Image (cartoon, rainbow, N blue to C red):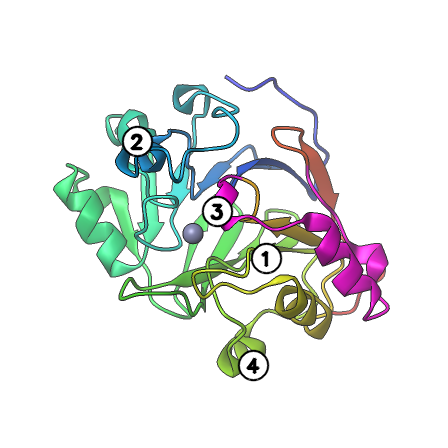
Amino acid sequence: MLPEIDIADGEVAVWWIGQAGFYLLTSDRKKILIDPYLSDSIGEATDGEYARLYPPPVAPDALDPDVVLLTHDHPDHLNEPTLEFVISDESVKFAGPSDCCAHLSELGVPQPRMVELGVSDEFSVGGTRIKAIPAFGIGSAIHLGYEITCAGGVRLYHTGDTDLDAKLLDDAPRNPDAVFVCINGKWQNMDVESAAELAVSINAAAAVPMHHDLFAKNSADADDFRRALQSRGREEIFLPLEIMVPYIFSRRQGELR
Ligand SMILES: [Zn+2]
């Protein structure tokens, strides 16, 4: 298990577990696991071409989520070896687009443990509200992002894997306390420039780069993302998280919503 940490009302602790994976602990002690990739199954399937650059920073069974939130059915997001341990735990629920739910069903997750989400659908985990946001990723998988309004009010936006589509600019949440944004610039995902454009356009209070750290052939330099924010006059929102180092978000002061 992760160490217990103190968080006050209205705060949320966030651990980045690499790639698009995050683990959230809300102030009402609910745990939300997003897109965990904690195996090297893609490296094994590609003869090392997409081997992970560092070992899984935490064992899957050290996490005890209430819900696993999935953005789309690609193996670096819905990763079978990583999910094995939670699939066998009947207390864990899953939420994601319909093709993720179909995949989970094949893996033995019964229907009552799944929440199927389409764009704009919402559901709650304790006092936390999760809303599906459109995402425009590569291939035929259904892609979603998520707006997560945590118990106490901190509002986080996870983009999922997406291009900077005009509809994304229309529909992305405004004024989030943080955006977790893909910056790898490959496989149709935003590069550092479009990721900075999105973060600035939606007036994010913090911009956390993700999905750039795990594979040599699918990486980007977070410092280039900092420079892209700097060129737009918003360097101060750059917030690179360290793997497995908890970061406490609180609601930004005095913000009218
Ligand atoms: Zn991905």
Q: Which of marks 3 and 2 precedes in the sequence?
A: 2
User: What's the residue at 67%, 61% (across, down)?
Assistant: 176
Is 167 drawn above or below residue 50 in the view shown?
Answer: below
User: What percent of the width, then of the height, locates residue 19?
Assistant: 51, 43
Magenta segment boundaries in residue numbering: 214-241
Q: Secondary structure at mark 2?
A: helix
Does residue 221 appear to the left or right of 105 in the view shown? Answer: right
Residue designated by label 3: 217
Q: Which percent across, then down, holds residue 169? A: 58, 78
| Tag of residue 36 | none
Q: Earlier in the sequence, mark 1 or mark 2?
A: 2
What is the distance, in whole Å, between disc 3 and disc 4 at their CAs? 31 Å
Residue to which mark 2 is pinned: 44
Given contact means CB atoms under 8 Å apart, are the residues at marks 1 and 2 in contact? no
Identity, as a three-letter code, of the amino acid under mark 1: Ile
As shown in the figure, which amino acid type bears the numbered disc 3?
A: Lys
Residue 170 numbered tag: 4
Q: Residue at x 48, y 56 (%)?
A: 130
Q: Nearer the viewer, mark 1 or mark 3?
A: 3
**Residue at image mark 1:** 183
